[in-house]
Amino acid sequence: MLWLFAIVIGLVFGVVTGGKIGNLAKLQFRWPWLILAAVVVRESVVLTPLNRVDGARYVYVLSLAAIVAWTIWQFDRLRGVWLITAGAALNLLVIVVNGARMPVAPELAGSLLRRGNVGQYTVMGGGTHLNLLGDWISLYPSPEAYSPGDVLIGVGLAIVVFLAVRNPSVYKELTPP
């Protein structure tokens, strides 16, 4: 939800400051299907019953690593994408050091408190590491918990979309090989 909100904010501010939504069509990425596949896999693990399959959390980690790699590959194409990379890398770091699970603050964990682990999430505590990078941020009115990495990704998405809507010429054109 945070990331959708960030994209909408970027769109709105881009249009309000004289940009055009149609400018988004001028963006050109390297291997756009890779980011689409990684996001679909990531969201499938989060939002479907796949999150109950223990090994699915490792697929989630791989998809997050693919997102980090893809955004790094776009540095010279998308201004502001480095913020998305930094946020995703922070999330990847905390998840990897916690056995492919994102720690969630107990006060925001909801039903996770009863189970301890669900999918790629675990309740934050003495046995988890880098808790400062875990999900402990609550952004009203959303009931979800967010990590500093999630917030950084949201800021990066808003900036990338704003710049694309406002001034697509800031992005480099793809040159044929």
Image (spheres, rainbow, N blue to C red):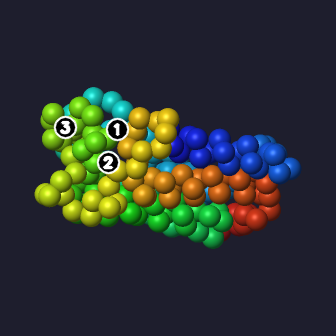
CB under 8 Å between callouts 2 and 1? yes
Q: How many marks?
A: 3
The residue to which callout 3 is attached is: 113
Kind of residue at disc 1: Val
Return the residue at label 1: 46
Q: Dividing the picture into quarters, in which one does residue 113 lie? A: top left
Disc 3 element: helix
Q: Residue at x 45, y 53 (%)?
A: 150
Mark 3–mark 2 Cα distance, whole angstroms, equals 21 Å
> In which quadrant of the rendered image does the C terminus lie?
bottom right
Residue at label 2? 60
The one of 108 and 167 positioned closer to us in this rendering? 108
Q: Residue 115 in the image: x percent, y percent?
A: 15, 35
The image shows residue 11, relative to residue 130, as above or below, that is above
- Depth-wise, is mark 3 or mark 2 nearer the camera? 3
Foreground: disc 2 or disc 1:
1
Where's residue 68, x and y in %?
44, 61
Give left or right: position of 152 versus 29: left
